[in-house]
Image: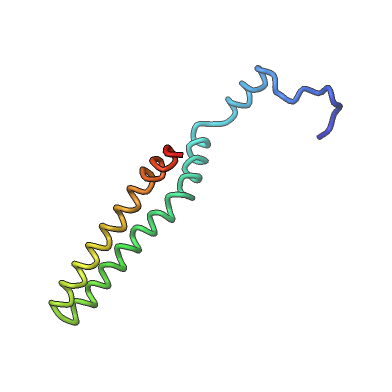
Amino acid sequence: MEGDINQNLLAEAEQSEIIVKEVRLKEKIWTEMKKMWVVAAPAIFTRFSTFGVTVISQAFVGHIGATELAAYSLCFTVLFRFGNGILHKEPELLTFLAGMY
């Protein structure tokens, strides 16, 4: 930080308008998209890979036999629904518990 202690740190209104005009809309959109993909890409990859593992597991279990495939499908469906139920209801439960105290 150069300058003395009395230097204004905030830009003048005219200077800030010039700075805002220099940044183009295309650059703003590109910057925001890069930030969004940092978060979205791992989520998309996780979603696809989880689905792929499920399909491949069912295919391998299907080679063992029809009864085993039915058992795997039933267990997977029940456990998957149970897990999703817990994940979707957890924020509501935490809000309820926080309200009690």
**Relative to 67, 89 lies left or right:** right
Question: Residue at (13%, 77%) from the top-left corner?
Answer: 66
Q: Residue at x 20, y 68 (%)?
A: 73
Is 27 situated above or below 89?
A: above
Left or right relative to 6: residue 22: left
Q: Residue furthest front?
A: 101
- Residue 62 appears at what percent x and percent y? 18, 76
- Residue, far right: 4
Q: Quadrant of residue 48?
A: bottom left
Q: Nearer the viewer, residue 79 or 41?
A: 79
- State left or right for residue 30 relative to residue 88: right
Residue 37 is left or right of residue 22, and the answer is: left
Q: Camera-side residue: 98 or 80?
A: 98
Q: Where residue 17 sits in the image (x, y, percent)?
A: 61, 21
Q: Position of residue 34 (x, y in %)?
A: 50, 46
Residue sitting farthest toward the left: 66
Give the residue displayed 40% in from the left and 40% down from the top: 95
8 up-or-down from 32: above or below: above
User: In the rendered view of the protein, which quadrant contains the N terminus?
Assistant: top right
